[in-house]
Image (tube, rainbow, N blue to C red):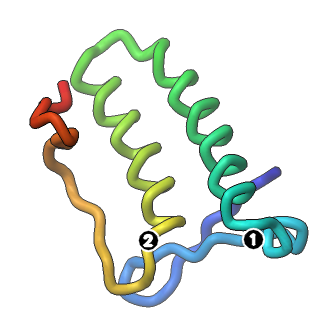
Amino acid sequence: MRVTETPALHGAKARFVPMQELLMEPTQLVLSLNAEVLEQLKRTQHIPHAGENGRAREKVIRRFLRQLLPAGFGIDTGFVIDASGGLSR
């Protein structure tokens, strides 16, 4: 599947959604998006600089979350804290 982004009002990005994706069950859609994210994250492994590698990985995750979150929610930089209180590295 090819995803294209086009500029929209106020700096938001629109995502082209193929018809077959619209007909998917929500679980299938998330699994499909997850597979894309894992492939994109795999591509970042070859960035040797730790800071730039992290920045590239954050960008992938931000794009993924924007596709799932309803309008009105935003994504910013920061840390991820899991249910056990562990902090992302």
- Dot label at residue 66: none
- Callout 1 amino acid: Val
Mark 2 lies on a secondary structure that is loop
The spot of residue 28 in percent (x, y) is 74, 55
Q: Are marks 1 and 2 in contact (CB under 8 Å)?
A: no
Q: Residue furthest front?
A: 84
Left or right: where does residue 3 sit relative to residue 50? right
Q: Quadrant of residue 66?
A: bottom left
What is the tally of numbered marks visible in this picture? Answer: 2
Which sits earlier in the primary sequence, circle 1 or circle 2? 1
Foreground pick, 5 / 36: 36
Q: Residue at x 53, y 76 (%)?
A: 7
Q: Is residue 27 above or below residue 83?
A: below
Q: Residue furthest right?
A: 20
Left or right: where does residue 7 sit relative to residue 23? left
Pointer 1 local density, CA inside 10 Å: few below 14, some 14–19, many at least 20: few
Foreground pick, 32 / 6: 32
Q: Residue at x 63, y 71 (%)?
A: 15
Mark 1 lies on a secondary structure that is loop
Pointer 2 local density, CA inside 10 Å: few below 14, some 14–19, many at least 20: few
* Residue corresponding to mark 1: 17
- Callout 2 amino acid: Leu
Q: Residue furthest bottom?
A: 9
Q: CA distance from mark 1 to mark 2?
A: 15 Å
Q: Is residue 65 above or below residue 35?
A: below
Quarter of the rendering occupied by the C terminus: top left
Q: Residue at x 13, y 32 (%)?
A: 87
* Residue corresponding to mark 2: 69
The spot of residue 59 in percent (x, y) is 39, 45
